[in-house]
Image: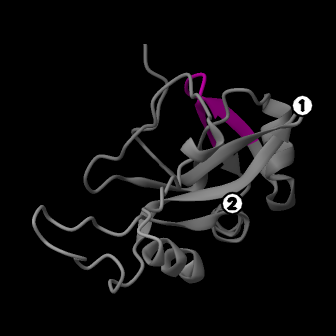
Amino acid sequence: LKRMEARATKFGLEIEYSPYGEDLGANFIRPRRELEENPDWLNDTLHVYGVDRLSTQEIMQYFEDYSPSYILWLDDSSGNVVFSDANNARRALYNHAQAIRLPPPKPAEGEEGGAGADAPAEYDKVWRRGPDYTKSGKKYPVLVRFATTLDKKTG
């Protein structure tokens, strides 16, 4: 990634960061559920987003190495995967999904360069990106985080 950033700088190009699946042209049916401040976490449950075109069985297979118990569908794009215990949920989150590197901050208008190139990498503190799910030759991004007590089916 550093080589790519250096090359872009050399040629005066701007790198398009799309850590949440926009790079795959994914069209999600429902918007992502953002967190309230200081949520109550469910340690044995992961919230998954981007599962619009996946079945319950496919999601269970996606996490099969971590003993998922069942999924609670919240809407067409997200659900909560409940695991047999908090350990398996934690292993699934940290071993199966990768931290999402955020794009560097853009310099303020009138500033040159800014902190972008020199700033340390920043990562999303809540969401992680799981391996893309491939179905019928098309890749779908899957985002994962711990579920909260507010991640419920609405309406």
Is 32 rendered above or below residue 91? above
Mark 1 in CB contact with mark 2 (< 8 angstroms): no
Residue at mark 1 to residue at mark 2: CA–CA distance: 32 Å
Left or right, 92 with reference to 23:
right
| Amino acid type, residue under disc 2 in the picture | Asp
Mark with earlier residue (1, 2): 2
Along the line of sight, the residue nearer the viewer: 152 or 9: 9
- The residue tagged 1 is 136
Residue at 66% across / 63% down in the picture?
Answer: 97
| Amino acid type, residue under disc 1 in the picture | Ser
Where residue 147 appears, as percent x and y from the top left, is 51, 49
Question: Which of the 4 image quarters holds residue 31?
Answer: top left
Disc 2 secondary structure class: loop
Q: Which residues are magenta?
A: 70-80
The circle on residue 85 is 2
Would you say residue 76 sits in the magenta stretch? Answer: yes
Where residue 2 appears, as percent x and y from the top left, is 54, 82
Would you say residue 127 sits in the magenta stretch? Answer: no
Residue at 29% across / 67% down in the picture?
Answer: 105
Left or right, 16 with reference to 83:
left
| Residue most extreme to the front | 11
Disc 1 secondary structure class: loop
- Callout 1: few (<14), some (14-19), or many (20+) C-alpha neighbours within 10 Å? few
Quadrant into which the N terminus falls: bottom right
Along the line of sight, the residue nearer the viewer: 44 or 54: 54
Where residue 58 appears, as percent x and y from the top left, is 84, 37
Question: Which of the 4 image quarters holds residue 28?
Answer: top right
Left or right, 100 with reference to 93:
left
| Residue most extreme to the top | 155
